[in-house]
Image (cartoon, rainbow, N blue to C red):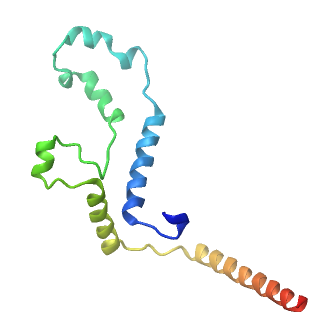
Amino acid sequence: MLEMGMTMSYEQLLMDQEFVKMTRRILQGIPVNKDTLALDVIKAVGPAGNYLAQKHTMKYMRSELSTTNLINRRMRENWEKHGSKTMDQVANEQAVEILENYKVKPLPDDVRKKIHDIVVEGEEEAEELAAFQRKKR
């Protein structure tokens, strides 16, 4: 939302969702213990060795991976080859896709009734308040 909630941007909403997801991942932290440090693996593989081929890497890489729907993590040359889309351009494409294709799931009947009851109660209270204010005049 922008301008104190008077304006909103679907693209900004999607980007904010990404930022929140990334922040949550950062706040989880990285566990540091004997197993995660893997000093034995580092010693065995050595400098310039292939850590990607290690079972330890395969065991931990999925849990430490941070995924994103909007940020392109390709190398620059590859990113340029695929259109050089910026984060806001990708967010725009996703927003358009969602708006054109999203199917709203109907609310369960009990939830619809509860919402209806709240609205009716609010309307009754508003009418009582309006009547009270008319009497004061």
Viewed as shown, does residue 106 lie left or right of 74? right
Left or right: residue 123 versus residue 131 is left
Q: Which residue is drawn at 78% across and 81% down?
A: 125
Q: Residue at x 42, y 53 (%)?
A: 17
Identity of the residue drawn at 70% across and 83% down: 120
Query: Which quadrant of the figure has residue 9?
Result: bottom left
Horizontally, residue 67 falls left or right of residue 17, namely: left
- In the rendered image, residue 23, in percent from the top left (x then y), is placed at 45, 41
Is 59 or 91 nearer to us in this picture?
91
Residue extending farthest front:
3
Please provide percent x and percent y for residue 95: 33, 66
116 lies above or below 41: below
Quadrant of res 36: top left
In the rendered image, the residue lying farthest to the right is 136
> Is residue 59 depicted above or below 107 in this figure?
above
The C terminus lies in which quarter of the figure?
A: bottom right
Examine the rendered structure and indicate whether residue 3 appears above or below residue 27.
Answer: below
Q: Is residue 25 above or below residue 5?
A: above
Viewer-side residue, 66 vs 13? 13
Residue visible at 31% across and 74% down? 100
Q: Could you tell me how many numbered marks the image carries?
A: 0
| Rendered location of residue 90, percent (x, y) | 26, 58
